[in-house]
Image (tube, grey):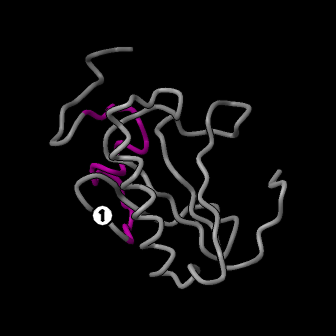
Amino acid sequence: MDFKSILKFKGGIFLKDCLFCKIAAGEMDTDFVYEDEKVVVFEDINPQAPVHLLIVPKRHISDLNSLKPEDGDLIGHVYQIAKKMAAKFKIAESGYRLVSNCGDNGGQTVYHIHFHLLGGRELQWPPG
């Protein structure tokens, strides 16, 4: 990793060349549906359901395999925000899916941990 590309921010680090770090830092023209000190939430640009939100931690963690025990509070927070967004977007009662892709074969395309919240229609299984 090129340590010159790592920048500090309140609450952790972000990588200057990471798309989701730039979005979380407010450097991109992204409309957040929710933001707090730990995460940002915005609509997916290629929605796979009537409601398709991305919940993105502000601190850069490349993937699920990079999580550390001390990240447990952050992941718990993500789940609480998912619950809040499901209620806000009126999909809590009918049901929704929260998923995070890990690695190439898992479908991860942006290597900054993020969670897809999908709902608003019946979701099939297996997904793909």
Relative side of 7 to 128, left or right? left
22 or 76: nearer the viewer = 76
Kindly identify which residue carries mark 1. 35
In percent of the image, x 51 and y 81: which residue is there? 89
| Foreground residue among 85 and 93 | 93
Magenta stretch holds residue 27: yes
Q: Quadrant of residue 110?
A: top right
Q: Residue 71 or 116: which is nearer the viewer?
A: 71
Please tell me which residue lies in front, 106 or 17: 106
Q: Is residue 2 left or right of residue 87?
A: left
Say which quarter of the image contains residue 29: bottom left
- The residue at the point 36 percent across, 36 percent down is 60
Residue type at mark 1 is Glu
Q: Position of residue 13 (x, y in %)?
A: 25, 33
Residue 99 percent coordinates (x, y): 61, 53
Q: Is residue 100 above or below residue 55?
A: above
**Label tally:** 1
Q: Residue 35, image x and y in percent?
A: 30, 64
Q: Which residues are magenta?
A: 13-33
Screen quadrant of the N terminus? top left
Q: Position of residue 32 (x, y in %)?
A: 37, 67
Vertical relation: 93 (above or below) 46: below
Left or right for 89, reference 57: right
Name of the residue lying farthest toward the left: 10
Q: Is residue 41 above or below residue 87?
A: above
Question: Which residue is rendered at x = 31% and y = 40% of the image?
Answer: 59
**Residue in the image at 57% along x and 57% along y:** 116
Is residue 118 part of the magenta span, yes or no? no
Category of crowding for the residue at label 1, using alpha-carbon neighbours closer than 10 angstroms: few (below 14), some (14–19), many (at least 20): some
Q: Secondary structure at mark 1?
A: strand
